[in-house]
Image (cartoon, rainbow, N blue to C red):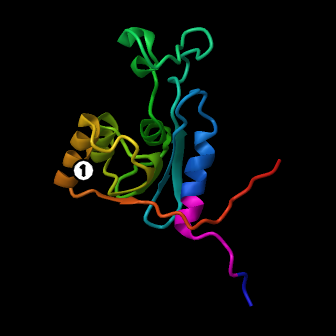
Amino acid sequence: MKRQDYLSWDEYFMGLALLSAERSKDPSTQVGACIVNPELKIVSVGYNGAPRGYDDDKDMTWERNGDFLDTKYAYVCHSELNAILNSDVPVKDCKLYVTLFPCNECAKVIIQSGIKEIVYLSDKYDGTKENIAAKKMLDACNIKYTKYETSGKDIKITL
């Protein structure tokens, strides 16, 4: 008889998005993403961080408040953008698993790249202007988005 407590596909891919978020050096918000093609093959992963080649120790600020140029918001690449850019193959018709609902800027990139579905863990910015704009664009482009329902299962990685 086969094992019954194995991970579902959604648990597996959201687990990879959560694990990817652990690579983020952002002290306040760690976001991860995993892109999967229709055959359930992992196409790419990403997390929020400085662009490749931009020194996140010397050049990067992680401040959340202050003048725009003195905050992380001017410099950080979001996990969805990183995952799309990290892919060596087109992401058209793929599904995106992400730990935080995409902002309006990421929604544009998701739409433009051809991703057809989003599974998200948190929507903590629900109701903000950026969130409303993202949902408006995703709805207009018939991109399905679904809140991930946790199973309560613990996934533990011990090194």
18 and 126: which one is in front? Answer: 126
Residue 116 found in image quarter: bottom left
Q: Nearer the viewer, residue 25 or 150?
A: 150
Q: Is residue 11 magenta?
A: yes
**Residue at the left extreme?**
140
Q: Which residues are magenta?
A: 4-13
Residue at the far bottom in the pictured view: 1
Circle 1 packing at 10 Å, graded few (<14), some (14-19), many (20+), is: many
Give the farthest residue toward the right.
159
Q: Residue at x 58, y 48 (%)?
A: 18
Quadrant housing residue 144: bottom left
Could you tell whether 109 is left or right of 56 in the image? left
Quadrant of the rendered structure where residue 75 is?
A: top left
Rendered location of residue 20, percent (x, y)? 60, 43
How many numbered marks, from 0 up? 1
Query: Left or right of 40: which side holds 137?
Result: left
Please tell me which residue is depicted at 41% across the width and 21% down the height of the picture.
73
Identify the amino acid type marked 1. Answer: Leu
Q: Secondary structure at mark 1?
A: helix
Name which residue lies at 64% across and 66% down.
153
**Quadrant of the image for the N terminus?**
bottom right
> Residue at coordinates 28% horizontally, 37% vertically from top-left?
128
Q: Is residue 68 rendered to the left or right of residue 139?
A: right
Is 133 located above or below residue 49 in the figure? below
Residue 92 is situated, as x and y percent measured from the top left of the image, at 35, 53
Residue 64 is situated, as x and y percent measured from the top left of the image, at 46, 20
Q: Is residue 154 inside the magenta stretch? A: no
- Identify whether 69 is placed above or below 153: above
- Front position in the image: 46 or 74: 74
Look at mark 1 in the image and give the residue it sits on. Answer: 138
Q: Is residue 25 above or below residue 60?
A: below
